[in-house]
Image (tube, grey):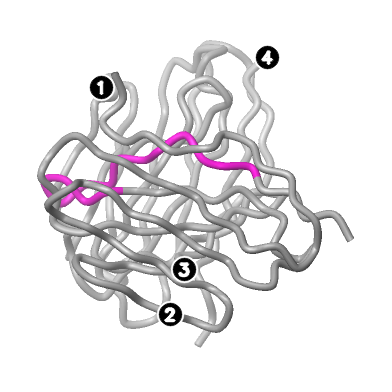
Amino acid sequence: KAGVTQTPRYLIKTRGQQVTLSCSPISGHRSVSWYQQTPGQGLQFLFEYFSETQRNKGNFPGRFSGRQFSNSRSEMNVSTLELGDSALYLCASSSMTGSYEQYFGPGTRLTVT
Amino acid sequence: KNEVEQSPQNLTAQEGEFITINCSYSVGISALHWLQQHPGGGIVSLFMLSSGKKKHGRLIATINIQEKHSSLHITASHPRDSAVYICAVILNEKLTFGTGTRLTIIP
């Protein structure tokens, strides 16, 4: 089976812009979770989608949003980018909900200038 | 205080040494993951455990739910084991991460 894929792998944006990141899960997996990794805060949970519904959410402002499509692919969107949003954004897929199984993608490295 | 504490933060050892990385957490959890992250960012889940002990090759993970503590051991360490090892607990069905242990194995 192909692994989790994320596009794009690298992205440079300007403060104030918005960005959309994409995650394609392992075939058959219905759960996609998103994480942010920064040098200062480490890894933090953003949200989880399962069967097109957001099941869980971390402590991030409303500028961070996501969605999941009927084929389980997921997108996350960050509006009004801030310098502090520069990070590695990782998604992970699972056949079940609740973080009991996580297969991570390679990540998208976002730089905000 | 972080809910998940790892020690040590950095560890350098000679090839062949026995390695132990510790993880302590302050809340009741459902289960715990040990993750490995190589330079470049890719993360691999090594173990998910809720009790007892698991072994995979040279890696062993243990957890003591009552003492809120888990350890990851690497036997016969090798330079390819050099990576960041991250402990993550499942709390309210969300992962909460430790700050990671950077392991460097010198040939």
Q: Quadrant of the N terminus of chain B?
A: top left
Q: Residue at x 47, y 39 (%)?
A: A20
Q: Residue at x 32, y 59 (%)?
A: A32
Residue A69 placement (x, y as % from top left) = 28, 61
> Relative to A42, is A32 above or below?
below
Q: Mark 1 against mark 3, which lies toward the viewer?
A: 3
Amino acid identity at mark 4: Thr
Residue B17 appears in the picture as rendered: yes
Which chain contains the residue that carries disc 2?
B
Front-most of residues B91 and A103: B91
Q: Would residue A48 appear left or right of A9 to someone viewing this image? A: left
Alpha carbon distance from label 1 to label 4: 21 Å
Q: Residue at x 56, y 34 (%)?
A: B9
Reading the image, the residue beneath label 3 is: B46
Q: Mark 2 against mark 1, which lies toward the viewer?
A: 2
Amino acid identity at mark 1: Gly
Q: Is residue A5 magenta?
A: no
Residue B6 placement (x, y as % from top left) = 43, 38
Residue B36 placement (x, y as % from top left) = 55, 58
Reading the image, the residue beneath label 2 is: B55
Q: Secondary structure at mark 4?
A: loop
Q: Secondary structure at mark 2?
A: strand
> Relative to A50, is A87 above or below?
above
The answer to whether the residues at label 1 and label 3 have Cβ atoms under 8 Å apart is no
> Are the residues under badges 1 and 3 in a single subunit?
no
Reading the image, the residue beneath label 4 is: A113
Magenta-highlighted residues: B89-102
The answer to whether the residues at label 3 and label 4 have Cβ atoms under 8 Å apart is no
